[in-house]
Image (spheres, grey):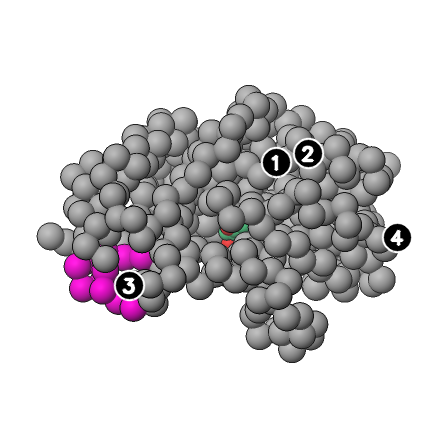
Amino acid sequence: MDFIPLARPDITPEDIAAAEKVLLSGMLVQGLNVEKLEKNISEFTGCKHTVAVSNGTATMHLALTVLEIGKGDEVIVPAFSYVATANVVELVGAKPVFIDIEPDTFNINASEIEKHITKNTKAIIAVHEFGMACDIEKIASIAKNYNIYLIEDAACALGAMQNGKYVGTFGDFGSFSLHPRKAISSGEGGLVTTRNSDFAKRVKILRNHGIDMVDEKIEFVAAGFNYRLTDFQAALVNNQLKRLEQIIAFKQKLALVYFDQVKNKKITLPFISHGMNHTWQSFHIMLDESIDRDKTIGLLKEKNIGTNYGAQCIPFQKYYRDKYAIDCLKNFPVAMKAYTKGLAIPIYERLTEDNISYIASQLNTL
Ligand SMILES: *Cc1c(COP(=O)(O)O)cnc(C)c1O
Protein backbone atom coordinates (compact mmCIF):
# COMPACT_ATOMS: atom_id res chain seq x y z
CA MET A 1 0.00 0.00 0.00
CA ASP A 2 1.50 3.34 -1.06
CA PHE A 3 1.28 6.28 1.27
CA ILE A 4 -2.05 8.13 0.94
CA PRO A 5 -1.32 11.82 1.47
CA LEU A 6 -3.93 14.05 3.11
CA ALA A 7 -4.37 16.02 -0.11
CA ARG A 8 -3.15 15.90 -3.66
CA PRO A 9 -4.27 18.14 -6.53
CA ASP A 10 -5.36 16.33 -9.67
CA ILE A 11 -3.68 18.09 -12.56
CA THR A 12 -4.41 16.27 -15.84
CA PRO A 13 -2.34 16.25 -19.06
CA GLU A 14 -5.07 18.49 -20.58
CA ASP A 15 -4.71 21.02 -17.75
CA ILE A 16 -0.95 21.06 -18.33
CA ALA A 17 -1.39 21.43 -22.10
CA ALA A 18 -3.61 24.47 -21.54
CA ALA A 19 -0.99 26.08 -19.29
CA GLU A 20 1.84 25.08 -21.63
CA LYS A 21 0.17 26.81 -24.53
CA VAL A 22 0.22 30.07 -22.60
CA LEU A 23 3.82 29.54 -21.48
CA LEU A 24 4.92 29.00 -25.07
CA SER A 25 3.03 32.11 -26.23
CA GLY A 26 5.34 34.30 -24.13
CA MET A 27 2.34 36.21 -22.67
CA LEU A 28 2.76 35.21 -19.05
CA VAL A 29 1.18 37.91 -16.91
CA GLN A 30 -2.51 38.73 -16.46
CA GLY A 31 -4.22 38.60 -19.82
CA LEU A 32 -6.96 36.89 -21.81
CA ASN A 33 -6.97 33.68 -19.77
CA VAL A 34 -7.44 35.64 -16.55
CA GLU A 35 -10.36 37.47 -18.17
CA LYS A 36 -11.81 34.15 -19.25
CA LEU A 37 -11.46 32.74 -15.74
CA GLU A 38 -13.32 35.74 -14.34
CA LYS A 39 -16.11 35.27 -16.85
CA ASN A 40 -16.28 31.52 -16.13
CA ILE A 41 -16.56 32.05 -12.37
CA SER A 42 -19.25 34.72 -12.78
CA GLU A 43 -21.21 32.33 -14.98
CA PHE A 44 -20.76 29.47 -12.53
CA THR A 45 -21.72 31.33 -9.34
CA GLY A 46 -24.17 33.77 -10.91
CA CYS A 47 -22.30 36.68 -9.29
CA LYS A 48 -21.99 39.63 -11.66
CA HIS A 49 -18.30 40.44 -11.17
CA THR A 50 -15.29 38.25 -10.53
CA VAL A 51 -11.71 39.47 -10.17
CA ALA A 52 -8.90 36.89 -10.20
CA VAL A 53 -5.93 37.61 -7.91
CA SER A 54 -2.73 36.01 -6.67
CA ASN A 55 -4.12 34.08 -3.67
CA GLY A 56 -7.09 33.66 -1.36
CA THR A 57 -5.69 35.88 1.38
CA ALA A 58 -5.20 38.76 -1.09
CA THR A 59 -8.92 38.59 -1.97
CA MET A 60 -9.91 39.47 1.59
CA HIS A 61 -7.14 42.04 1.99
CA LEU A 62 -8.48 43.74 -1.14
CA ALA A 63 -12.10 43.57 0.03
CA LEU A 64 -11.29 45.17 3.40
CA THR A 65 -9.18 47.82 1.68
CA VAL A 66 -11.96 48.69 -0.78
CA LEU A 67 -14.42 48.96 2.12
CA GLU A 68 -11.95 51.35 3.81
CA ILE A 69 -11.94 49.31 7.00
CA GLY A 70 -9.01 50.16 9.28
CA LYS A 71 -7.92 51.58 12.59
CA GLY A 72 -10.69 51.75 15.22
CA ASP A 73 -12.93 49.37 13.28
CA GLU A 74 -14.03 45.91 14.37
CA VAL A 75 -14.60 42.92 12.12
CA ILE A 76 -16.45 39.83 13.33
CA VAL A 77 -14.73 36.53 12.44
CA PRO A 78 -15.14 32.92 13.57
CA ALA A 79 -12.68 31.72 16.24
CA PHE A 80 -12.06 28.55 14.22
CA SER A 81 -10.74 28.93 10.65
CA TYR A 82 -7.48 29.21 8.82
CA VAL A 83 -5.53 32.12 10.40
CA ALA A 84 -5.67 34.14 7.16
CA THR A 85 -9.32 35.01 7.96
CA ALA A 86 -8.20 37.09 10.95
CA ASN A 87 -4.75 38.07 9.67
CA VAL A 88 -6.27 40.24 6.94
CA VAL A 89 -8.21 42.18 9.59
CA GLU A 90 -4.94 42.80 11.46
CA LEU A 91 -3.23 43.77 8.20
CA VAL A 92 -5.60 46.69 7.62
CA GLY A 93 -5.22 47.81 11.26
CA ALA A 94 -8.71 46.77 12.41
CA LYS A 95 -9.59 44.48 15.30
CA PRO A 96 -10.91 40.95 14.80
CA VAL A 97 -13.77 40.09 17.16
CA PHE A 98 -13.89 36.32 17.51
CA ILE A 99 -17.08 34.29 17.77
CA ASP A 100 -17.32 30.61 18.69
CA ILE A 101 -18.44 27.99 16.19
CA GLU A 102 -21.19 25.37 16.11
CA PRO A 103 -20.00 21.93 17.31
CA ASP A 104 -21.58 19.98 14.47
CA THR A 105 -20.82 22.13 11.39
CA PHE A 106 -17.59 23.87 12.56
CA ASN A 107 -19.07 27.08 11.11
CA ILE A 108 -19.58 30.37 12.93
CA ASN A 109 -22.48 30.29 15.37
CA ALA A 110 -24.75 32.85 13.69
CA SER A 111 -26.92 33.30 16.79
CA GLU A 112 -23.86 34.57 18.71
CA ILE A 113 -23.12 37.37 16.25
CA GLU A 114 -25.58 40.09 17.27
CA LYS A 115 -24.43 40.36 20.88
CA HIS A 116 -20.89 41.16 19.63
CA ILE A 117 -21.92 43.97 17.32
CA THR A 118 -20.83 47.41 18.61
CA LYS A 119 -20.84 50.91 17.12
CA ASN A 120 -17.36 50.11 15.75
CA THR A 121 -18.38 46.93 13.91
CA LYS A 122 -17.88 47.49 10.20
CA ALA A 123 -18.03 43.99 8.75
CA ILE A 124 -18.50 40.28 9.29
CA ILE A 125 -16.20 37.76 7.62
CA ALA A 126 -18.29 34.58 7.48
CA VAL A 127 -16.28 31.45 6.68
CA HIS A 128 -17.74 28.45 4.86
CA GLU A 129 -15.49 25.98 6.63
CA PHE A 130 -14.35 22.70 5.05
CA GLY A 131 -16.62 23.12 2.01
CA MET A 132 -20.07 23.53 3.55
CA ALA A 133 -21.89 26.87 3.76
CA CYS A 134 -22.41 28.49 7.14
CA ASP A 135 -25.91 29.88 7.77
CA ILE A 136 -25.16 32.69 5.35
CA GLU A 137 -28.83 33.60 4.80
CA LYS A 138 -29.19 34.40 8.48
CA ILE A 139 -25.83 36.21 8.61
CA ALA A 140 -26.69 38.27 5.52
CA SER A 141 -29.91 39.41 7.16
CA ILE A 142 -28.03 40.38 10.37
CA ALA A 143 -25.50 42.36 8.28
CA LYS A 144 -28.34 44.11 6.49
CA ASN A 145 -30.24 44.95 9.72
CA TYR A 146 -27.17 46.47 11.34
CA ASN A 147 -25.93 48.08 8.13
CA ILE A 148 -22.55 46.36 8.19
CA TYR A 149 -20.63 44.77 5.36
CA LEU A 150 -20.48 41.04 4.76
CA ILE A 151 -17.45 39.26 3.30
CA GLU A 152 -17.74 35.54 2.64
CA ASP A 153 -14.52 33.60 3.13
CA ALA A 154 -15.44 30.81 0.75
CA ALA A 155 -11.79 29.79 0.24
CA CYS A 156 -12.77 26.13 0.73
CA ALA A 157 -16.22 26.24 -0.73
CA LEU A 158 -16.45 26.90 -4.46
CA GLY A 159 -19.68 25.13 -5.47
CA ALA A 160 -21.24 25.11 -2.00
CA MET A 161 -24.81 26.39 -1.67
CA GLN A 162 -27.47 27.33 0.81
CA ASN A 163 -30.94 26.56 -0.53
CA GLY A 164 -29.67 26.39 -4.09
CA LYS A 165 -27.79 29.71 -4.07
CA TYR A 166 -24.02 29.59 -4.41
CA VAL A 167 -21.75 30.92 -1.67
CA GLY A 168 -19.90 34.04 -2.70
CA THR A 169 -23.17 35.64 -3.87
CA PHE A 170 -24.72 36.50 -0.48
CA GLY A 171 -22.23 39.07 0.78
CA ASP A 172 -20.76 42.34 -0.46
CA PHE A 173 -17.74 40.24 -1.39
CA GLY A 174 -17.08 36.54 -1.88
CA SER A 175 -13.56 35.19 -1.56
CA PHE A 176 -12.19 31.94 -3.01
CA SER A 177 -8.77 30.30 -2.94
CA LEU A 178 -7.09 28.27 -5.68
CA HIS A 179 -4.46 26.76 -3.35
CA PRO A 180 -3.69 23.04 -3.96
CA ARG A 181 -5.75 22.07 -0.88
CA LYS A 182 -8.91 23.42 -2.57
CA ALA A 183 -11.12 21.71 -5.20
CA ILE A 184 -9.41 23.30 -8.21
CA SER A 185 -5.96 24.84 -8.12
CA SER A 186 -3.56 27.12 -9.93
CA GLY A 187 -0.85 26.52 -7.31
CA GLU A 188 -1.50 29.91 -5.77
CA GLY A 189 -4.54 31.92 -6.77
CA GLY A 190 -7.70 33.61 -5.57
CA LEU A 191 -11.04 34.95 -6.79
CA VAL A 192 -13.07 37.90 -5.54
CA THR A 193 -16.77 38.01 -6.38
CA THR A 194 -19.08 40.99 -5.95
CA ARG A 195 -22.41 42.29 -7.23
CA ASN A 196 -21.23 45.87 -6.89
CA SER A 197 -19.66 47.35 -10.05
CA ASP A 198 -17.82 50.10 -8.14
CA PHE A 199 -16.31 47.58 -5.73
CA ALA A 200 -15.21 45.38 -8.66
CA LYS A 201 -13.58 48.34 -10.38
CA ARG A 202 -11.80 49.33 -7.16
CA VAL A 203 -10.52 45.77 -6.63
CA LYS A 204 -9.14 45.73 -10.17
CA ILE A 205 -7.32 49.03 -9.65
CA LEU A 206 -5.81 47.91 -6.33
CA ARG A 207 -4.81 44.53 -7.79
CA ASN A 208 -2.63 46.27 -10.35
CA HIS A 209 -0.50 48.98 -8.67
CA GLY A 210 -3.38 51.45 -8.56
CA ILE A 211 -3.56 51.80 -12.34
CA ASP A 212 -6.71 53.22 -13.92
CA MET A 213 -7.57 54.83 -17.23
CA VAL A 214 -8.39 58.52 -16.87
CA ASP A 215 -9.36 60.37 -20.07
CA GLU A 216 -7.93 57.45 -22.06
CA LYS A 217 -4.61 57.85 -20.29
CA ILE A 218 -2.98 55.47 -17.81
CA GLU A 219 -2.88 57.07 -14.38
CA PHE A 220 -1.74 55.74 -11.02
CA VAL A 221 -4.80 56.68 -8.97
CA ALA A 222 -4.13 54.69 -5.78
CA ALA A 223 -1.23 53.15 -3.84
CA GLY A 224 -2.15 49.68 -5.04
CA PHE A 225 -0.73 46.20 -4.62
CA ASN A 226 0.56 43.70 -7.13
CA TYR A 227 -1.98 40.95 -6.52
CA ARG A 228 -2.22 39.79 -10.15
CA LEU A 229 -2.64 36.17 -11.21
CA THR A 230 -0.48 34.94 -14.10
CA ASP A 231 -2.15 33.95 -17.35
CA PHE A 232 -0.76 30.39 -17.33
CA GLN A 233 -2.20 29.84 -13.85
CA ALA A 234 -5.57 31.02 -15.14
CA ALA A 235 -5.35 28.62 -18.10
CA LEU A 236 -4.52 25.74 -15.73
CA VAL A 237 -7.56 26.41 -13.59
CA ASN A 238 -9.94 27.24 -16.48
CA ASN A 239 -9.45 23.72 -17.71
CA GLN A 240 -10.09 22.20 -14.27
CA LEU A 241 -13.23 24.29 -13.90
CA LYS A 242 -14.84 22.22 -16.67
CA ARG A 243 -14.93 19.25 -14.29
CA LEU A 244 -15.60 21.04 -10.98
CA GLU A 245 -19.09 19.58 -10.64
CA GLN A 246 -17.74 16.14 -11.45
CA ILE A 247 -15.02 16.55 -8.78
CA ILE A 248 -17.58 17.56 -6.16
CA ALA A 249 -19.90 14.66 -7.09
CA PHE A 250 -16.98 12.22 -6.86
CA LYS A 251 -15.98 13.50 -3.42
CA GLN A 252 -19.59 13.17 -2.30
CA LYS A 253 -19.43 9.52 -3.36
CA LEU A 254 -16.23 9.01 -1.35
CA ALA A 255 -17.83 10.70 1.67
CA LEU A 256 -20.67 8.17 1.53
CA VAL A 257 -18.11 5.38 1.89
CA TYR A 258 -16.81 6.99 5.09
CA PHE A 259 -20.38 7.43 6.37
CA ASP A 260 -21.11 3.82 5.58
CA GLN A 261 -17.94 2.23 6.92
CA VAL A 262 -16.61 4.25 9.86
CA LYS A 263 -18.26 2.54 12.81
CA ASN A 264 -16.00 3.65 15.66
CA LYS A 265 -18.10 5.10 18.52
CA LYS A 266 -15.13 7.28 19.54
CA ILE A 267 -15.34 9.15 16.23
CA THR A 268 -17.98 11.71 15.26
CA LEU A 269 -18.48 12.07 11.53
CA PRO A 270 -19.29 15.40 9.85
CA PHE A 271 -22.82 16.74 9.77
CA ILE A 272 -24.62 18.21 6.77
CA SER A 273 -27.11 20.93 7.69
CA HIS A 274 -30.56 21.15 6.14
CA GLY A 275 -30.51 23.16 2.89
CA MET A 276 -26.77 22.70 2.33
CA ASN A 277 -24.66 20.59 0.00
CA HIS A 278 -21.16 19.61 1.11
CA THR A 279 -18.29 20.03 -1.35
CA TRP A 280 -15.84 18.21 0.97
CA GLN A 281 -12.77 20.40 0.82
CA SER A 282 -12.00 18.49 4.03
CA PHE A 283 -13.60 15.47 5.65
CA HIS A 284 -13.24 16.61 9.25
CA ILE A 285 -13.92 14.10 12.00
CA MET A 286 -13.92 14.61 15.76
CA LEU A 287 -12.15 12.23 18.12
CA ASP A 288 -13.57 11.78 21.59
CA GLU A 289 -11.75 12.64 24.82
CA SER A 290 -10.20 9.15 25.11
CA ILE A 291 -8.19 9.51 21.88
CA ASP A 292 -5.09 11.68 21.61
CA ARG A 293 -5.33 13.48 18.27
CA ASP A 294 -1.62 14.11 17.72
CA LYS A 295 -0.72 10.51 18.56
CA THR A 296 -3.44 9.40 16.16
CA ILE A 297 -1.84 11.41 13.35
CA GLY A 298 1.42 9.48 13.98
CA LEU A 299 -0.37 6.15 14.26
CA LEU A 300 -2.22 6.65 10.98
CA LYS A 301 1.01 7.76 9.30
CA GLU A 302 2.49 4.36 10.20
CA LYS A 303 -0.50 2.85 8.39
CA ASN A 304 0.37 4.99 5.34
CA ILE A 305 -2.45 7.47 5.86
CA GLY A 306 -1.78 11.21 5.89
CA THR A 307 -3.99 13.26 8.23
CA ASN A 308 -3.72 16.57 10.03
CA TYR A 309 -5.69 18.89 12.27
CA GLY A 310 -8.36 20.77 10.32
CA ALA A 311 -8.03 24.43 11.29
CA GLN A 312 -6.79 26.65 14.11
CA CYS A 313 -8.48 28.23 17.07
CA ILE A 314 -7.16 31.57 15.83
CA PRO A 315 -7.19 33.57 19.10
CA PHE A 316 -5.12 30.72 20.63
CA GLN A 317 -2.25 31.24 18.14
CA LYS A 318 0.82 33.01 19.51
CA TYR A 319 0.35 36.37 17.77
CA TYR A 320 -3.27 36.63 18.95
CA ARG A 321 -2.52 35.24 22.44
CA ASP A 322 0.21 37.82 22.91
CA LYS A 323 -1.90 40.68 21.58
CA TYR A 324 -5.35 39.96 23.02
CA ALA A 325 -4.77 37.39 25.83
CA ILE A 326 -8.30 35.99 25.54
CA ASP A 327 -9.14 32.96 27.68
CA CYS A 328 -9.96 30.68 24.75
CA LEU A 329 -11.15 27.68 26.76
CA LYS A 330 -13.69 29.91 28.46
CA ASN A 331 -14.73 32.02 25.46
CA PHE A 332 -14.38 29.58 22.57
CA PRO A 333 -14.80 26.09 24.04
CA VAL A 334 -16.14 24.66 20.78
CA ALA A 335 -13.35 26.14 18.65
CA MET A 336 -10.77 24.83 21.13
CA LYS A 337 -12.27 21.36 21.00
CA ALA A 338 -12.32 21.36 17.19
CA TYR A 339 -8.71 22.57 17.23
CA THR A 340 -7.51 19.86 19.63
CA LYS A 341 -9.74 16.91 18.70
CA GLY A 342 -10.50 17.53 15.02
CA LEU A 343 -8.84 15.50 12.30
CA ALA A 344 -8.95 16.04 8.54
CA ILE A 345 -8.72 12.76 6.62
CA PRO A 346 -8.06 12.20 2.88
CA ILE A 347 -10.81 12.95 0.35
CA TYR A 348 -9.89 13.91 -3.22
CA GLU A 349 -10.21 13.07 -6.87
CA ARG A 350 -7.30 10.66 -7.13
CA LEU A 351 -8.54 8.32 -4.40
CA THR A 352 -10.63 5.23 -4.98
CA GLU A 353 -13.47 3.82 -2.91
CA ASP A 354 -11.03 1.06 -1.90
CA ASN A 355 -8.63 3.67 -0.51
CA ILE A 356 -11.47 5.11 1.55
CA SER A 357 -12.49 1.63 2.78
CA TYR A 358 -8.92 1.04 3.89
CA ILE A 359 -8.81 4.36 5.78
CA ALA A 360 -12.21 3.62 7.35
CA SER A 361 -11.00 0.19 8.52
CA GLN A 362 -7.95 1.79 10.15
CA LEU A 363 -10.12 4.41 11.86
CA ASN A 364 -12.25 1.61 13.23
CA THR A 365 -9.21 0.19 15.08
CA LEU A 366 -8.55 3.42 17.03
C1 LIG B 1 -7.13 28.32 2.24
C2 LIG B 1 -7.83 29.29 3.07
C3 LIG B 1 -7.49 30.66 3.06
C4 LIG B 1 -6.27 31.19 2.39
O1 LIG B 1 -6.19 31.00 1.04
P1 LIG B 1 -4.76 31.18 0.32
O2 LIG B 1 -5.07 31.04 -1.12
O3 LIG B 1 -3.87 30.09 0.85
O4 LIG B 1 -4.25 32.53 0.67
C5 LIG B 1 -8.30 31.53 3.77
N1 LIG B 1 -9.36 31.10 4.47
C6 LIG B 1 -9.71 29.81 4.52
C7 LIG B 1 -10.92 29.40 5.29
C8 LIG B 1 -8.95 28.86 3.84
O5 LIG B 1 -9.28 27.57 3.91
Of mark 1 and mark 4, the one earlier in the sequence is 4
Is ligand 1 within 8 Å of the beta carbon of the residue shown at mark 1? Answer: no
Residue 27 visible to an observer of this rendering: no
Q: Kindly identify which numbered label has been placed on residue 210.
A: none
Q: Position of residue 72 (x, y in %)?
A: 85, 62
Sort mark 3 into few (<14), some (14-19) or many (20+) by Cα contacts within 10 Å.
Answer: some
* 42 versus 1 height, above or below: above
> Could you say where residue 319 lies in the image, as x and y percent from the top left?
61, 73
Q: Which residue is mark 1?
A: 135
Label disc, if present, on residue 119 of the rendered structure: 4
**Of pointers 2 and 4, the one earlier in the residue sequence:** 4
Q: Is mark 3 within 8 Å of ligand 1?
A: no
- Residue at 18% across, 47% down: 361
Residue sitting nearer the eye, 142 or 233: 142
Q: Residue at x 51, y 48 (%)?
A: 103
Q: Around disc 4, counting alpha carbons within 10 Å, would you say few (fewer than 14), some (14 to 19), or many (20 or more)?
A: few
* Residue type, label 3: Thr
**Is residue 300 located in the magenta-colored stretch of the structure?**
yes
Residue shown at 47% from the left, 40% from the top:
131
- Disc 1 residue type? Asp
Q: Which residues are magenta?
A: 295-307
User: CB of mark 1 within 8 Å of CB of mark 2?
Assistant: yes
Q: Nearer the viewer, residue 39 or 285?
A: 285
Q: Residue furthest left?
A: 1
Three-letter residue code for mark 2: Lys
The answer for how far apart the CA atoms under marks 1 and 4 are is 24 Å
Q: Secondary structure at mark 2?
A: helix
Q: Which residue is mark 3?
A: 296
How far is disc 1 from disc 3 in space, using C-alphas?
32 Å
Q: Badge 2 is on which residue?
A: 138
Q: Is residue 101 left or right of residue 289?
A: right
